[in-house]
Amino acid sequence: VRILLVDDEAAIQRAVGPLLRSRGYEVDVAGTGADALGMFESRTPDLIVLDLGLPDLEGTEVCRRIRAKSAVPIIVLSARGAEGDKVNALDLGADDYVTKPFGPEELLARIRVALRRVGSEEPTDSGVFRAGDLTIDYDRHRVLRNDTEIRLTPKEFELLSLLVRNHDRVLTHRAILKAVWGPNAVEQPEHLWTLVAQLRKKIEPDPATPKYLLSEPWVGYRFVASGQGSRD
Amino acid sequence: MSARLHRDWSRIAAAVATVAIVTAALRWFAVSNAATVSTTYLMVVLVVAASSRLRVAVVTSIAAMLSLNFFFLPPVGNFSIADAQNWVALIAFLTVSLIASNLSAVAHARTQEAVSRRDELARLFDLSRDVLMMTDSPEALAVLARSVARRFDLDFVAVALPRRGDWNVFEAGSQHADLDRRELTKALASAQASLEFDAHARTYAGHRTMTVEGRDIRLVPLRVGTKPIGILAAAGRPVEAGTLDALAGVVAIAIERAQFLEERTASELMRQSEQLKTALLASLGHDLRTPLTAIRVAASNIVTPGLPPDDRAGQSELILTEVERLTRLFENTLEMARIDAGAVATESRWTHPSEIVAAARDQVEHTLAAHPVTVSIEHDVPVRLDPRLTASALAHLLENAAQYTPAGSAIEITVRRDETRATELPPDGQLVIGVRDHGPGIAAADLPHVFERFYRGAAAKARASGTGMGLWIVRGLLAVEQGQVFAENCPDGGAKFTILVPAAVKEAP
């Protein structure tokens, strides 16, 4: 498995490079946005770890250009405290993010999840998806937990199927609102909070400590297919 | 007052003498026609009335009347009058001359008033100009009081402003008076209670008089619009009530302006300090995260079983580098805080320039390792300066040169003495330390700003490390020892930074 690491900091390159290699990944390192785009073409990595603070191009721009050509998983590294950059990158097609300073296990876990997601069969709107004790039947619009049907409203089903189709990715509030309620609803997150709370009551064994439908504070939500709760 | 009285007396004497001379002349020419005589006297009275005050004219009228009676109206030689017709002539003469005197005196007074109005207007105008020129210094109000005293020739002027139950008094003028605070409070209270607009005089009366050590001091409310904000106290030359009002108006505007300027300065300072905090947090945020991440990842890499020994050594080296980077960041932040707090002490002693260079290189040995460094010192004789601050400033310049030039490019340090005895130079000459690199130089747009705090040029922003503190610290440290630093681009490429530090040299024995 080949990973492209894009970060202009020599220190990060020198620490994260060996970290990934020691776990058996092949690693290419790019220090600038231009390098990153070039190496994306020439090396065809299976996953990209992308720092948002690059000297030449905005990291979000690199993200947008790569996403325009490929569905390769992108994990964004953000050294900025601002949530705005992360959200932008996610809206532009990044799959996940890790905030600096991060620990090695955190990054490795995100990489594993992203790779597993790509490895699993292509998500479609038809067929059946299983996650832990949940079964989502897209064709029949049915959700089962341990063979017991859970009754969902159409909006609840729409939200759940959106999250499940993008399982293990972070979907921003904005992206979800737009997909479920339409472009005019993006400034009304209260719809989303209510619907998420309702959905959790129905699908989570313990709605107070969700295992499937996780919040990414100030950013969005993530559906964890393994049903293992937070952090892989 | 007495001077004026004295002047009146001499005028009266002169007028009476004129009457006597005219009388003698009339007698000499044997003029006896009462009409001619009285017309001549009337002319004298009019001349006197036009040039003097009413009382002088009145005395002249009476003297002329008596002379007319005594010398020309029969029976001549005494004050009795035989003919009733002459009574009428005498009374008519007196009446005409008194009325003429009065009219003339009124006209005279008007002129005087117009002149003094013009004078006061000119003073007010000058004062307004003073007010407009006033800067936002802490002494603005004292300056204002002085301007009032000077422009209006007053012996005593005080601008009194209420401040939290007490009074702030700004005094000026040749004399001093202890203003009774209670009187001030009373005057302000009454000004607040009523407007006391005197429609007849078209002034805000509300004026009070306070007696201090036998002197009358006039108190005038200072109003902005109709709201009283303080009291103006004045003594010395009498100033007309309307003028005092206008004067108080100008002073009130000046006070408002001074307070506005003060507030603006305060809010400007606040804004700058907020900006600084934001910049500091942004800078620290960025510069802490990267080394912390690298250290955390590298530390866990070291204990990973699968890592080749070479990589393991590399990871430990990486940790050391990043710890050094954090240490520098910490030291820079501390040094910056010390400069800000004015807590950098300077201690001069005799040092060899070579020691300073060696100390500076030691401080940034690790960063400098990738660059060949050459040192040339013109005369390595002891100089008197603060070696610690100078070396620290030089170390920052060396670090800067190493960071912003490609690895392997040379850095040259030159040291010489400048003994030019120009007036603007330190009297004992100065030490000139140059740091020249062979990197890309400094962009022209960045050159004027490189010593600003947290300023990072386009080239610097492209590099992740660097905080924008270093060069600011260099300037701050050197300022403590009256030194300076300049940046320039060399015509053949690369940047050159020059430090100038005042330094005495040990005279050769």
Image: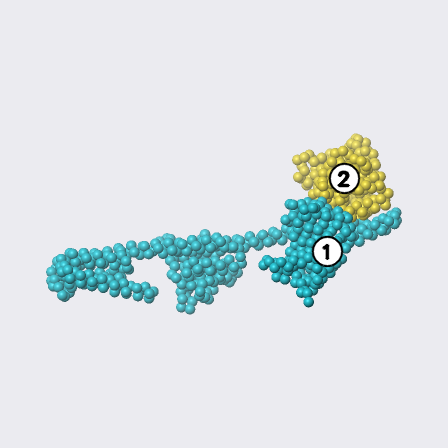
User: Left of B245 or right of it: where is B355?
Assistant: right
Q: How is the image coloured?
A: by chain
Q: Chain of mark 2?
A: A
Q: Residue at x 79, y 35 (%)?
A: A41
Disc 1 versus disc 2: distance between alpha carbons?
Answer: 41 Å
In the image, the chain rendered in cyan is B
Q: Residue at x 36, y 56 (%)?
A: B116
Q: Amino acid at mark 1?
A: Ser
Q: Amino acid at mark 2?
A: Asp
Q: Secondary structure at mark 1?
A: strand
Q: Nearer the viewer, residue B164 or B411?
A: B411
Mark 1: give few (<14), some (14-19) or many (20+) Cα within 10 Å: some
User: Left of B422 or right of it: where is B96?
Assistant: left
Label placed on residue A35: 2
**Picture coordinates of residue B342, whole percent (x, y):** 64, 60
Quarter assignment of residue B504: bottom right
Mark 2: give few (<14), some (14-19) or many (20+) Cα within 10 Å: some
Chain A: give its colour: yellow
Residue ID for mark 1: B376
Q: Residue at x 74, y 36 (%)?
A: A65
User: Which residue is situated farthest in the front direction here?
Assistant: B509
Q: Is residue A207 above or below residue B247?
A: above
**Picture coordinates of residue B318, whole percent (x, y):** 80, 51
**Picture coordinates of residue B454, whole percent (x, y):** 67, 50
| Quadrant that contains the C terminus of chain B | bottom right
| Quadrant that contains the N terminus of chain B | bottom left
